[in-house]
Image (cartoon, rainbow, N blue to C red):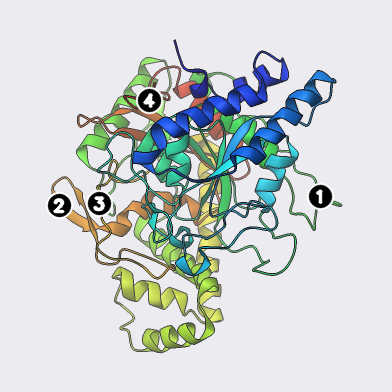
Amino acid sequence: MTDIALKPAIELAAMIRDREIGSRELLDHYLERVERFNAPLNAIVALDIEGARRKADRADAALARGESWGPLHGLPTTIKELFENEGMPWTSGDAQFAERVADVNAPPVQRIVDAGAIVFGVTNSPLNGMDVQTYNDVYGTTNNPWDTDRSPGGSSGGTAVALATGMSAFDLGSDIGGSIRNPAHYTGLYGHKPTYGIVPRRRLQLPGLMSVGDLSVSGPLARSAEDLDFALSILAGPESDRAVAWRLELPEPRQTALQSYRVAAWLDSPVAPVDGAVLERLDAAVAALRDAGVTIDDDARPEIDFAESDRVYRGLLAATSARRIALKAFAEMAKREDELPGEDADPPPAYARGAALRHAQWLHLNEAREQMREHWARFFERYDVLLMPVTSVAAIAHDHSERGDGTIAGQGRKISVNGTDRSYFDQLSWVGLITVVYLPASVAPVGLTPAGLPVGIQIVAPYLEDRTAIDFAKRLGEVIGGYETPPGYE
């Protein structure tokens, strides 16, 4: 029998609402699992046990009076530590902020709280969220439950591990370099990177950065595709300063049957080669869809150049990341950038160049992005979804040999693809194709490699058609894959 902790959040919320289980009862069950499983994984790094129990008791009492706080009424929830969560630690993994406590909720956290959820803990992320692994000097390293010698990815690694092992019902990720999609792929979960701009991110008050940076989004990880849609219905909406006049109504999925979907598959590229163990699972997913009666075009591509799109993405990524750089450090980086050969595309100089962009250079990159967005829009006139890898490899071994300064990390590290060393930053290439053009993408698990590591497939949909990607993820799970509990956490 499946442990109740592993059920989808949408089912658990309904069980609380129907009083089949109490909020306090479910909370205590999750806390028991945290006590049993968390120490060797280090996914949940801070708890508010007594505060959460008081809120859970109030939630149960409210239901007994016939009152509802919303669709997440009484649901025990964790939140990625990178988000401000009122009354909880908010260090961003930075030792200089080790004692910092949030005094306000970040906008997506507020939407979850307003929907009735009870936040009982926070989950680990790398320094300032800027790595494809999850470790920092404040909380240490988070381990992958499928193999604790490996990373669960980043930056939403703690979130992914808490959900994959049934230590939380619901959690929130952020994604600028695959930080929702990579951890979902590395741990066997579903994840959704929303269309840029549909989940509020603008801070509600000073102090701190109030502007919404380029590329970054907030969105859910989950144990089911249904949870992705459930979460999106809660998270999506206009920014706070626009809500007085703007409304958001996402369209329904393009199709109502799996066989009706117009599907293209782009599963490998010499720009970012995919390891054979991962490619085998992606090919198996495509074969299962064909066996189920889906027509799939293996040759269709948007009229973009992968390498050029990657260059534009990395330039814009570095530019928006520079918001965190102190002006003195920025001046030094600009000086360094002036000394770099323009053709040097290796990660460290390319990052320095992007972080020190002149505004005119940024405008040229943005124009290139807008032209690519048009090519993607034309592609989706002919196809409903595009299937792609999330990244080139399955979960990587821990490698903290080079520590970044919070703006970027891992310039000298490598990953192994088919026995060949590749740049650590290849982990960003496939997700970056989608991030740079603001498109939505869902990740669905499609099985395990021969080494027993999860593989996810990236399902890309047209701009603002998030529900098409999520619906296809749900239907794919009916023919192959789906969430599988890591061994020992059933």
Sequence order check, earlier mark of 4 and 3: 3
Q: CA distance from mark 1 to mark 4?
A: 44 Å
Using the image as rendered, state which of residue 244 and residue 132 is in the foreground: 132
Is residue 482 shown to the viewer in this render?
yes
Q: Of helix, strand and loop, which one carries label 3?
A: loop
Residue kind at label 3, given as amino acid type: Pro
Q: Amino acid at mark 1?
A: Trp
Question: 66 or 328: which is nearer to us?
Answer: 66
Q: Is residue 117 above or below residue 347?
A: above
Give the residue at mark 1: 246
Q: Secondary structure at mark 4?
A: loop
**Does residue 87 appear left or right of residue 363 in this picture?**
right
- What residue would you read off at disc 4? 489
Nearer to us of marks 1 and 4 is: 4
Q: Which residue is mark 3?
A: 270
Q: What is the secondary structure assignment of the residue under circle 2?
A: strand
Q: Are marks 1 and 3 in contact (CB under 8 Å)?
A: no
Tell which tag, 1 or 3, sits nearer the viewer.
1
Q: Mark 1 packing: few (<14 Cα in 10 Å), some, or many (20+)?
A: few
- Gap between marks 4 and 2, in whole Å? 34 Å
Front-most of 46 and 378?
46
Q: Residue furthest left?
A: 419
Horizontal and vertical percent position of residue 37: 39, 32
